[in-house]
Image (cartoon, helix red, strand yellow):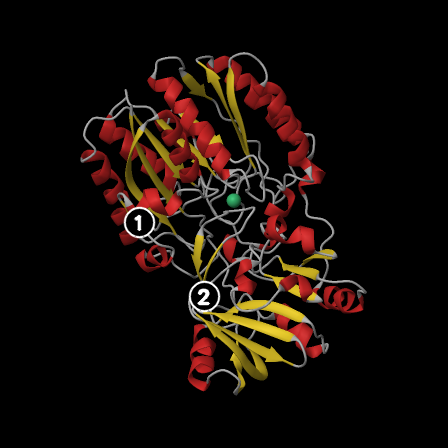
Amino acid sequence: MRLVIGKISHESNSFSVIPADLEAFNERGYRRGADILTAFENTNTPLGGFLAGAQSQGVELIPTVAAEATPSGPVTRTAFETILEDLLQGIRTAGSFDGILLQLHGSMVTDDYEDGEGVILSAVRDEVGCDIPIITTLDLHGNITDLMLEKATAFFGYDTNPHVDKYERGLEAFSAMVRVVEGKSHPVMARSHPPIMPHPLRVRTDTGPLVALLERAREWENKPGVINVSVFGGWPHVDIRDAGICFVPVTEGDRSLAETIAQDLAEDALNRLPEFLPRDLVQTEDAVQRAMEATEGPVILAEIGDSPAGGSSGDGTVTLRALLEAGADGVAIVVKDPEAVAEAVRRGVRSSFEMEVGGKTDTFHGEPVVVRGTVRALTDGTYQNRGPKDTGVKMDVGRTAVIRVGQDFDIVLTERRISPTDPEVFRQAGIEPSAKKIVVLKSGGHFRAGFTSMAADIIDVNTPGVTAADVTSFNYEKVNRPIFPLDDITG
Ligand SMILES: [Zn+2]
């Protein structure tokens, strides 16, 4: 058996001013061909799952492209056309093969298309015709469209948020593909899309309404003829018609059963509307005070409005400013600022540093703040995630400078945007986050996988930005209305 594999992944944010251009994909290591096999071996990723499955069953893989950019504004026309053409070229030159396994996200928007994955799957389907199965893993934050369903054979969405089951879902997709190629399985899919567009804070899988919905999905999966049931929390930070939650059951040739399951889950979700509204958010000044008064650390301050893993600038200053003004100490925070990194490198380790930091990308995440301190460390910003999310994946946040303010207040300046979801981002800079009193994380929720075990307390801080908690504060033009919570849908 020979299978084509590939990955094109981007979570787009309509409100972000940062483009996903080719440079952004290259920064995250855009790979083609055999390079992919070594890069993703033993990683907690769908590609890692495809690789492991193939190895254990003696299946030959034909790697094409692996492209991902940090979430941001739409994918540029040039980047999208280049990457898609590389994928299609990889398929054209693959020789004869039996199926295509892809890792896609589900919330990709491009300069030209609001349904990036629909366009990718259409192009691949046109290339290979109707007889080749196309099976795809998708992110739990995917906004899934009818076009995507029409062009693909089966979807396997992540069941966890933070996404710690990427490898398992990859392996599951691989096994499903083997059964299809062997003629033992004939998947069909259905989709339901109740009008609910929750903030990611309320599509966690350890608390909130998805817990019960996933449980119900698992019950359906235990019934005969059901291959998989994906629960997509959706992604509210793109302004497209199909934004919002979605259920996609995959059954053994029984479309009416798939539709029944999809409807059942949609009704369940509609009965839980209030549960989809964010709760327990704390305003910045109150959060800083609570963290400073805490007797045990570290207290995690999660900056909900500035989450680069959702497309924000990563240079937000609202929490940093509040901490400096309150005289906090024992702090660690990551801020993207290539200009400040260059200045710290120019001055050198142990020299004094004074400069305006952060708030330079846009006007949504706070003004630049004056930082006076000492350059404590300079690193190359490369490290490997230790997990449990994205375990084994190599990261490169660009040159990194640590500025020490006061006794024990460390500002980690990076050249590139990063949601610090793995503690290694601090350790590569010589900082042990568990030893700090306050750790500020520009992350909406994925940080919980790597930081919960060390945290004395976790506070979701209601900071402003393009990933802010209140989705009704954004100006939507395209999303299908009415939709909760933008509209009252109970009447
Ligand atoms: Zn996600």
Q: Whole-Å distance between the Cαs marked 1 and 2?
A: 20 Å
Residue drawn where x is 62% and y is 80% of the image? 405
Residue 422, placed above or below residue 139: below
Q: Residue at x 68, y 51 (%)?
A: 453
* Image x and y of residue 291, in percent: 75, 65
Q: Which image quarter: residue 483?
A: top right
Residue lying farthest to the bottom in this orientation: 352
Q: Earlier in the sequence, mark 1 or mark 2?
A: 1
The reply to whether the residue tagged 2 has its Cβ within 8 angstroms of ligand 1 is no
Whether 102 is drawn above or below 182: the answer is below
Residue 487 appears at what percent x and percent y?
A: 62, 42
Query: Where residue 111 appears, x then y in whole percent?
Result: 34, 51
Mark 1: is the Cβ under 8 angstroms from ligand 1?
no
10 Å crowding of disc 2: few (<14), some (14-19), many (20+): many
**Relative to residue 283, is residue 150 depicted above or below?**
above
Q: Which mark is residue 137?
A: none
**Residue 381, numbered circle:** 2
> In which quadrant will I find the N terminus?
top left
Q: Judge from the rendering whether residue 84 lies leftward or rightward of residue 320; answer left or right.
A: left
Instruction: Say which quadrant the C terminus sits in.
Output: top right
Question: Is residue 491 visible to the viewer in this orientation of the structure?
Answer: no
Vertical relation: 321 (above or below) 314 = below
Residue bearing the label numbered 1: 31
**Between 307 and 438, which is closer to the camera in this rendering?**
438
Element at label 2: loop
Res. 172 visible in picture: yes
Question: Image point 50% across, 82% down: which residue?
Answer: 349
Local secondary structure at mark 1? strand
Q: Amino acid at mark 2?
A: Gly
Q: Are marks 1 and 2 in contact (CB under 8 Å)?
A: no
- Horizontally, residue 361 falls left or right of residue 438, namely left
Q: Residue at x 45, y 41 (%)?
A: 45
